[in-house]
Image: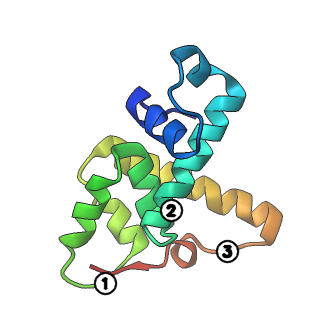
Amino acid sequence: MQLMPGTAQLVAKKIGLGPISREQMNDINTNILLGTNYLSMIYNQFDGSAVLATAGYNAGPGRPRNWRQSLQHPVEGAIFAEAIPFQETRDYVKNVLSNTVYYAALFEGPQSLKARLGYLAP
């Protein structure tokens, strides 16, 4: 999983690992531990919104929080994703969430992306 060094240090501290070296950050088991904990933290910040959590993982959690606050009314998650002002983050969110629907269909049965993304309110 890809984490910025500062984020990796923050997560390591929060989960009780304390300061970690670059070598530890690149260790596959530590990296997965840090990345999954970080994603979980972001999901919790955004009340389980896949769109906001995925955008936050890519662009930092402050940006999707600001984008959400600028909403005038609830919008579909897919529409919110299309309106993300950063091309890289917009593409990342769309790719990750479309893959989520694909893999969910393999394990849980077919479902629509629209249903999975739900609505976002200001």
Which residue is the extreme one toward the top? Answer: 23
Name the quadrant of the C terminus: bottom left
Q: Disc 1 or 3, which lies upstream in sequence?
A: 1
The residue that disc 3 covers is: 111
Q: Could you tell me which secondary element the residue under label 3 belongs to?
A: loop
The label nearer to you, 1 versus 2, is 2
Q: Relative to the observer, which residue lies in front, 11 or 114?
A: 11
Q: Report the disc number at residue 14.
A: none
Q: How is the image coloured?
A: rainbow
Q: Give the Cα separation between the discs numbered 1 and 3.
A: 22 Å
Q: Disc 1 or 2, which lies upstream in sequence?
A: 2
The residue that disc 2 covers is: 43
Looking at the image, residue 80 lies above or below residue 33 = below
Q: Horizontal and vertical percent for residue 120?
A: 37, 77
Q: Horizontal and vertical percent for residue 93?
A: 45, 53
The residue that disc 1 covers is: 74
Q: Give the Cα separation between the discs numbered 2 and 3.
A: 21 Å
User: Which residue is depicted at the point 31% across and 84% down?
Assistant: 74
Name the quadrant of the N terminus: top right
Dividing the picture into quadrants, the one containing residue 15 is top right
Looking at the image, residue 116 lies above or below residue 38 = below
Q: Give the Cα separation between the discs numbered 1 and 2.
A: 19 Å
| Residue 94 as seen in the image, left or right of residue 99 | left
Under mark 3, the amino acid is Gln
Q: Residues within 10 Å of mark 3 (few under 14, many from 20)?
A: few
